[in-house]
Amino acid sequence: MNKPLILITNDDGIHAPGLKILTDVMRQLGDVIVVAPDKPMSATGHAVTITSPLRIQKLREETGFREFSCSGTPADCVKIGQKAILGKKPDLVVSGINHGSNASVNVIYSGTMAAVIEGAIDNIPSIGFSLDDYSFSADFSKCAPYIRSIAENVLKCGLPDYTCLNVNIPSVNGSPIKGIRIVRQAMAFWDEKFDHRQDPHMRDYFWLTGVFRNSDEGEDTDEWALRNNFVSVVPMHFDLTSHKTIPLLRDWETGNLN
Amino acid sequence: MNKPLILITNDDGIHAPGLKILTDVMRQLGDVIVVAPDKPMSATGHAVTITSPLRIQKLREETGFREFSCSGTPADCVKIGQKAILGKKPDLVVSGINHGSNASVNVIYSGTMAAVIEGAIDNIPSIGFSLDDYSFSADFSKCAPYIRSIAENVLKCGLPDYTCLNVNIPSVNGSPIKGIRIVRQAMAFWDEKFDHRQDPHMRDYFWLTGVFRNSDEGEDTDEWALRNNFVSVVPMHFDLTSHKTIPLLRDWETGNLN
């Protein structure tokens, strides 16, 4: 049986420690190609590069392993990895391990998860992994068995069409991780402010800051799982339609207004 | 009765003709503040600026109208407009008129629609408007009555919590627009390629190109509405959870693996 072909990317850039751990685990499961941004790309959302060209650079090549840096975003990396480097679809796309949670509303802003959604748009089983610790020197040591278990399940069973997974791993600081929970995206939000400053030339500038607040107490949410030392797995799709709202707006339909 | 306060942004930048048309219509409905990117920001997805500060510049001020350019993304504009300029929530966020369709999967990549989702995250009724014509000199003349009708409905009736609208207007080239249809996001995709070139220094670079293909024939979709000269209105939310997949993955739950 052929080994599965696994495409890896992230949004913290080619030099991030989380990418290294994820690559080590995936190399135990199949042939690996890494295509990751040549610089940090956090909070780039689902940006893609259309007004400038992309560059790629091969950094390493060994049996069953190739590594490239790319000048683009995480979503670009998934596109160019398939279309310009591999010339075919991989069996699995994985992204991460992100330095910081992508649970709840964070998924919307995340470059890591944009790469995963890009994989789902191409109907490739895709998984994003994030550790709930923003530190560059975060302790990823407990992540590997969970990443391996979830990736093995996806390689073995697949996922429903156009579906991907958002996996967040708690930062437990010595406590044990309790296991894996399949949950929904919590309705939790940032309470944002702008820090208003003046530069040395007396011109105003603004830094975005914020405090994360969770008012969704559901025990079926990713935030609950993380707060209770479980790995959260949210199955995701990219149909943004609020289907239940469609019938509520029917009487807004009109004929020609010109 | 106080006039509604309307925050306007876009992703084509402060000088785009589509923004001017949208502003003209909104000034008929309420007090208006424009906070738009100082340069084109198409396909920036839901990027936000966290690793550098933001600048804003006031360009115009009249009774009931203020206009600012911002160095950030469309999502940044919605945040800074509320938190640093207004100091409160507007009654309505509108974004566009985008030069080009944001129907079907395009919504995922769109900076215009990221601004609208940002409004929904803040639980403000929010609407994105796009014209199915990428030209900078597109004919926006037939858009105004539809934009006005939809915005008036939203101001009068509101929207369900955390819900926004993705409105796409057909480019009819002389034919009449037939009216408004409330529809779902079509499952239609780009068939993408990379155009591989060499620069004058013999180094490789890659341009993303693609052809749009719709294999979703549903007459309840935004693509069907546009192809049949209707304005499409898709109610949207930002819960990416594939709820129907959750029970399928229950047996992936485990206890501690370390």
Image (cartoon, coloured by chain):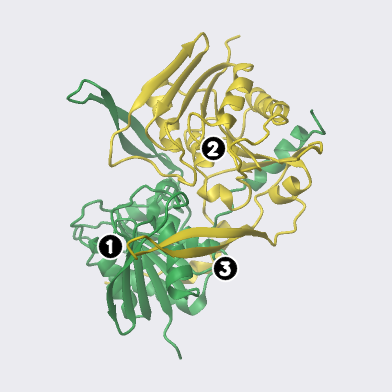
Chain colours: A green, B yellow
Q: Amino acid at mark 3?
A: Pro
Determine contact: label 2, label 3, CB under 8 Å. no
Amino acid under disc 1: Ile
Is residue A230 visible to us here? Answer: yes
Categorize mark 2 by other alpha carbons within 10 Å: few (<14), some (14-19), many (20+). Answer: many
Do tags 2 and 1 sit on the same chain?
no
Q: Can residue B125 be seen by looking at this rendering?
A: no
Q: Position of residue A154 (x, y in %)?
A: 46, 73
Q: For this rendering, which residue is in front, A15 or A112?
A: A15
Given the image, what chain letter belongs to the residue carrying mark 2? B
Seen from the viewer's position, the closer of residues A88 and A183 is A88
Query: Is there one chain holding both mark 3 and mark 1?
Result: yes
Quadrant assignment, res B125? top right
Q: Is residue B120 left or right of residue A73?
A: right
Residue A14 - label: 1
Which label sits on residue B162? 2
Which residue in the protein does label 3 denote? A160
Judging from the image, mark 3 belongs to the subunit labelled A
